[in-house]
Image: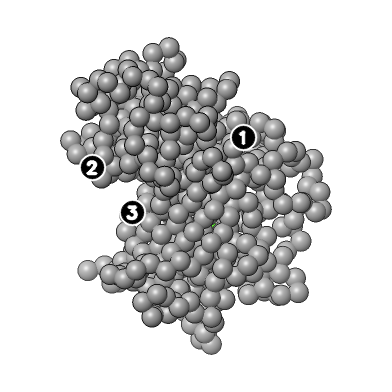
Amino acid sequence: MKITANNPNRKSWLPVEKDSDFPIQNIPFGVFLTKDDITTIGTRIGNYAIDLAALQQLGYFEGIPLTEGIFMQDSLNDFIEDGRTVWRLVRNRIADIFDLENQKLKENEAHKDIIIFNIEDIEMLLPVVIGDYTDFYSSKDHATNVGTMFRDPENALLPNWVHIPVGYHGRSSSIVVSGTKIRRPNGQTLPQGASQPVFGPCKLLDFEVEMGFITTDANNLGEPMPIEEARSHIFGMVLLNDWSARDIQKWEYVPLGPFLAKNFASTISAWVVTLDALEPFKVAGPKQDPKPLPYLEEEGLTSYDISIETSIKPKKQDETLVSKTNFKNLYWSISQQLAHQTVNGCNVRTGDLYGSGTISGKDKNSYGSMLELTWKGTQPIKMSDGTERKFINDGDTVIMRGYCKNEEIRIGFGECIGKIKKARKFPIE
Ligand code: CA
């Protein structure tokens, strides 16, 4: 089916600012709360949120096989479960309804009142009930940097890394939507030179610049999913800040890997941008040498050109840009990650989230964590307010922004924001 929603020449009758992340070619999906306390599934064009439940109720999706009230929900899960044909039909129809040439809704003031909201008048909610969360480790530069810092610069990349999209199972209960405040975690750490651990607030709080993809049901338990099928089961992508407590991580991760240093919070952006909308921004992935095993072999354009910028905004101060990276820096593709996840028969379900792993590039300013940007705190970053940062301070806000851009259009993810609150006193008062 043709993705007519991607027509770069289409204009909307809703005003869209020139550098908006949300032109009519984007049509992302999210969940929001209106001023009247109604939760609904919606999309966004420019600075307007569009209530899809109201559109359906008023007959604008006629002819599309949708369950009654599919958008009158507090998560996208049921809609995602309907599969790619339905996602495409709905996106194409929304593009048509808001096309400059289409007068039907444009000239119906009563309907517009019910369907369209100013973005300032709504509150974005977590878009998906996330069942399982897998976090990969797919940036070669990141894995090399971390290996150099913590193990051995000569053998920074472990031998399995170029053969396996390395990953681990994370925790979904603490994944929150952009804007949610994050409390600095308490935990056990082993101070430098000490032989006994201490307990207290994390001192080395970090962000990880990642992107995540969200799936629909892909395979039955016990049945691997072929790599050629992977993308048809991926609904869309979000920005992901996988907050990390480096001092807690260093003490606890042996021998089973990440645990409490990683599961106190992960923030995702509120609008899920569909893979369909990202189609014009497909690019070749990096050359893979050695050649992956057959179940991971993939042809064609396997990556996406998505710029990601990360800033730190100290309390009451201007923000400072600290990292500029790109999704195309990743070594393993999303299809390879999903094919690997299922190769042993593990089943992928609707609403699962798969994190890319920290996205670092070759250059120092393209590193995707403070750990790398300040090289374990040895090279602090100068902020525009004159202060320095080795890691993240209380009161700091970390802001990630992601977008794709070509000569014709810009498709963005909006922002992925989290502000750090000071640690809870312990024992809890
Ligand atoms: Ca991570």
The answer to which image quadrant residue 37 occupies is top left
Residue at far right of view: 290
Where residue 195 appears, x then y in whole percent? 52, 85
Is the residue 12 above or below the residue 18 in the image? Answer: above
Instruction: Kindly indicate whether the residue at mark 1 contacts the one at mark 3 (C-beta within 8 angstroms).
Output: no
The residue located at (79%, 45%) in the rendering is 293
The residue located at (56%, 43%) in the rendering is 407
Q: Earlier in the sequence, mark 3 or mark 2?
A: 2
Residue at far bottom of view: 193
Mark 1 vs ligand 1: CB below 8 Å: no
Q: Nearer the viewer, mark 3 or mark 2?
A: 2
Secondary structure category for the residue under label 3: loop
Amino acid at the residue labelled 2: Asp
Where residue 40 appears, x then y in whole percent? 30, 32
What residue did someone put label 2 on? 121
Instruction: Kindly indicate whether the residue at mark 2 contacts the one at mark 3 (C-beta within 8 angstroms).
Output: no
The residue located at (63%, 75%) in the rendering is 149
What residue did someone put label 3 on? 179
What residue did someone put label 1 on? 231
Amino acid at the residue labelled 3: Gly
